[in-house]
Image (cartoon, grey):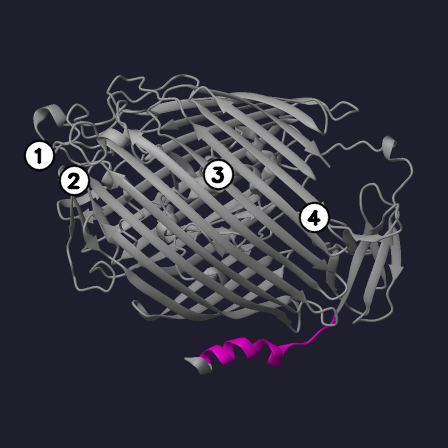
């Protein structure tokens, strides 16, 4: 095994050759300092071969003897033409700001979210502009205006939102923060609510099997959240938010540049929900009460001359939730049998660091190191059932990048190590364990931007409980004609299911827990294995002389040894390994159009076919709609000279009927129909931007006041055998309105 890792790591250097030029584009500041200029255009004159400088102003271009002159340009700066005599040249260009910026008129707008035409993977980037459309408070609420991600409540008591992609729940999605796995293990149930929305700079949603560099667990895809950077974020940022459901929230950012190389930021998030609501009169809170404090200190080091960039993050979280019956008082009723209640207390400490080195002498050669540590402690009880988990995790990843022959042939290789300690207890039963995994990976990419891109990778991992295994991944993009992208992908994923942490909604019921032990090494169960296959087609075009595009994709996920979560017996939840067939088919058709200046329309249709072989037969996955219709419309007025404008945004969602898990064995009073009714919701927001420094916003979720009546079975007898709050298909609270403000100092 050690020899394999050595080979994977050093093979790239055996093939390395170079025929390139490299350089840096900078801007001249009033203080006479040269600052990196990101996003500058660098192109060989007379050709279509060019690049855009990265965040540090760096670029690398293939070189041929026929290439003589290099054109460098950026809006608001004087363009330059540079003569290049030979390869292996390192160029430093300084652009001067123009004196007539007031005469420049910007006629195009960057899309708030966009799917890449050139990447081999099916990647959609959601910018901070898109995130502001829903005044999102945390990551779980960041996808309300995105058709690829489905958001719904996990149950009628905890108020927890869960996401799905390709018809599969979040455990099958690799969720990372700056490409470091973050929402996993003990954090699966509530972790998305632990990342404030204002901390997020952008989100990349990748459908299908993820890259081999980020681990072996990705099955349905990857969601990566890029955080704001101390160097580029506002010096001061304040966001205050209040809603009629009793939620108050305050976010503050403070950033400062200490010197030419070091910047730091302090980010503080606090929210509180103290009011109690029971709109349907079932004696249970519609939403939990509680509070959260979330603090992060972030450091950034940038040294372009030596090719170094580094980030260090320190983070602390304390989150407390109380739910249950309206009359519940933990000081009086805890672990009693008269009033049902629940408390979930979470404390989380994180440290993460990233170090990147770009060789100043050899183009396209770089080395990256990722390190993270987290301690996640959850003390909780649900009625008279306790659930405690203390999860300590270590993750390291070393990544080496270079090219073969020329810049079209890129390779990436490295090694990774992870360690997880789970101290987990359900009532009096101990499920503690230690997991260790070490692996190596190799990835080859071919980039011919005009026609073909492909990425092929393979991982070899050894896990102390799962054994030694291989996970291959493949993505390809072909451009058959102008403004098009045809993509294919397949990949294998493997994961150990954390059956309690991932399914905490089972605790807000009286169901007994049964694990059908097959002598596996984790909960007595064998690991899950799945293959994902995908095809997609993206086409841009002009409709009535306006930009439009259509994106069609189909993905199929086939499972082996899936851990089946079986709710089909009303008073039980059964966990067992799959015997038979389990699959998730997902079809999405998305249309984007700009019919008028500053007016954007996004609409999508989704079809799901998700079935699993249960002990009682092959059935549709419960609470998974077969169809979804999504539409979003947004409009901005033209900005004034001071940057003032109005923003209007509205989102419509329609969900088809969803299958309930069987209740035929329940007493007649607690039986449900086979399917839920279809539902539709409308969200809207209006933002008044007064200047670049200040704006106000008001909005509403579910403004048509759709509400699921009586979502809790046996609410009048929560200590009885039929108590269950997991049959949630729609909103419980009804309409929710909010208002807020944002203040910024650049």
For mark 4, give the secondary structure.
loop
Q: Nearer the viewer, residue 434 or 541?
A: 434
**Residue lying furthest front:** 331
**Residue lying furthest bottom:** 3
Which of pointers 1 and 2 indicates the residue nearer the eye? Answer: 2
Label 3 crowd (10 A; few <14 / some 14-19 / many >=20): some
Residue 511, which numbered label? 2
Which of pointers 4 and 3 indicates the residue nearer the eye? Answer: 3
Residue 293, which numbered label? 3
Q: Earlier in the sequence, mark 2 or mark 3?
A: 3
Residue in view at x 49 percent, y 47 percent? 316
Marks 1,2: beta carbons within 8 A: no
Residue 319 drawn at (x, y percent): 41, 39
Where, by quadrant of the figure, is residue 727 drawn? top left
Q: Earlier in the sequence, mark 4 or mark 1?
A: 4
Residue 665, which numbered label? 1
Q: Nearer the viewer, residue 38 or 296?
A: 296
Marks 4,1: beta carbons within 8 A: no
For disc 4, the marked residue is 231
Residues drawn in magenta = 4-19
Where, by quadrant of the figure, is residue 718 drawn? top left
């Amino acid at each position: 095994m050690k020899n394999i890792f050595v080979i994977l790591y050093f093979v790239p250097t055996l093939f390395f050759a170079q025929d390139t030029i490299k350089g840096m584009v900078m801007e001249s500041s009033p203080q006479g300092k040269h600052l990196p200029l990101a996003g500058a255009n660098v192109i060989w004159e007379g050709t279509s071969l060019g690049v855009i400088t990265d965040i540090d102003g760096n670029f690398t271009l293939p070189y041929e003897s026929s290439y003589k002159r290099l054109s460098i340009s950026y809006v608001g700066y004087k363009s330059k033409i540079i003569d290049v005599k030979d390869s292996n040249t390192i160029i430093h260009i300084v652009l001067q700001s123009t004196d007539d910026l007031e005469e420049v008129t910007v006629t195009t707008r960057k899309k708030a979210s966009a799917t890449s035409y050139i990447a081999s993977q099916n990647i959609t980037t959601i910018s901070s502009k898109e995130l502001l459309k829903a005044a999102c408070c945390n990551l779980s609420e960041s996808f309300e205006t995105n058709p690829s991600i489905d958001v719904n409540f996990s149950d009628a008591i905890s108020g927890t939102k869960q996401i799905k992609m390709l018809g599969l729940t979040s455990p099958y999605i690799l969720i990372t923060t700056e490409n470091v796995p973050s929402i996993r293990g003990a954090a699966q149930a509530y972790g998305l609510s632990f990342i404030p929305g204002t901390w997020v700079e952008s989100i990349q949603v990748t459908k299908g099997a993820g890259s081999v560099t980020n681990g072996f667990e990705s099955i349905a895809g990857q969601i990566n959240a890029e955080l704001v950077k101390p160097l580029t974020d506002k010096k001061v940022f304040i966001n205050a938010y209040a809603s009629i459901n009793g939620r108050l929230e305050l976010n503050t950012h403070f950033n400062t540049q200490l010197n030419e190389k070091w910047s730091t930021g302090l980010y503080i998030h606090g929210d509180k929900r103290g009011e109690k609501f029971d709109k349907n009169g079932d004696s249970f809170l519609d939403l939990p009460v509680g509070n959260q404090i979330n603090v992060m200190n972030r450091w950034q080091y940038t040294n372009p001359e030596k090719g170094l960039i580094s980030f260090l993050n320190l983070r602390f979280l304390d989150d407390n939730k109380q739910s249950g019956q309206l009359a519940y008082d933990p000081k009086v009723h805890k672990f009693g049998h008269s009033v049902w209640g629940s408390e979930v207390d979470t404390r989380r400490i994180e440290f993460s660091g990233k170090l990147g080195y770009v060789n100043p002498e050899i183009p396209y050669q770089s080395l990256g190191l990722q390190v993270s540590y987290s301690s996640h402690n959850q003390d909780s009880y649900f009625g008279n059932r306790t659930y405690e988990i203390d999860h300590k995790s270590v993750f390291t990843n070393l990544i080496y990048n270079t090219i073969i022959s020329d810049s079209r042939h890129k390779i990436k290789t490295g090694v990774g190590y992870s360690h997880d300690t789970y101290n987990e207890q359900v009532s009096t039963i101990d499920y503690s364990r230690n997991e260790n995994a070490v692996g190596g990976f190799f990835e080859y990419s071919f980039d011919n931007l005009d026609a073909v891109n492909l990425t092929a990778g393979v991982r070899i991992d050894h896990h102390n409980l799962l054994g030694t295994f291989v996970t291959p991944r493949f993505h390809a993009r072909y451009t058959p004609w102008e403004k098009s992208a045809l993509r294919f992908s397949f990949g294998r994923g493997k994961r150990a299911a954390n059956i309690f942490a991932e399914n905490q909604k089972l605790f807000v019921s009286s169901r007994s827990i049964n694990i059908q032990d097959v002598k596996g090494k984790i909960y007595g169960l064998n690991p899950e294995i799945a293959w994902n296959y995908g095809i997609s087609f993206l086409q841009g075009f002009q409709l009535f002389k306006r930009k439009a595009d259509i994106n069609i994709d189909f993905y199929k996920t086939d499972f082996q040894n899936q851990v089946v979560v079986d709710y089909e017996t009303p008073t039980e939840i059964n966990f067992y390994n799959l015997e038979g067939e389990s699959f998730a088919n997902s079809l999405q058709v998305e249309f984007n159009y700009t019919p008028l200046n500053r007016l954007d329309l996004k609409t999508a249709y989704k079809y799901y076919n998700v079935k699993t072989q249960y002990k009682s037969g092959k059935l549709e996955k419960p609470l998974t709609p077969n169809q979804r219709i999504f539409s979003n419309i947004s409009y901005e007025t033209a900005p004034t000279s001071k940057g003032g404008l109005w923003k209007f945004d509205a989102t419509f969602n329609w969900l088809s009927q969803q299958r309930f898990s069987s209740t035929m064995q329940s007493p007649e009073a607690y039986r449900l129909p086979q399917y839920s009714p279809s539902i539709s919701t409308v969200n809207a927001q209006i933002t008044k931007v007064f200047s670049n420094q200040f704006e106000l916003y008001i909005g509403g979720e579910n403004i048509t006041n759709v509400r699921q009546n009586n979502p809790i079975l046996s609410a009048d007898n929560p200590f009885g055998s039929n108590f269950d709050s997991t049959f949630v298909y729609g909103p419980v609270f009804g309409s929710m309105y909010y208002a807020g403000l944002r203040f910024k100092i650049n």
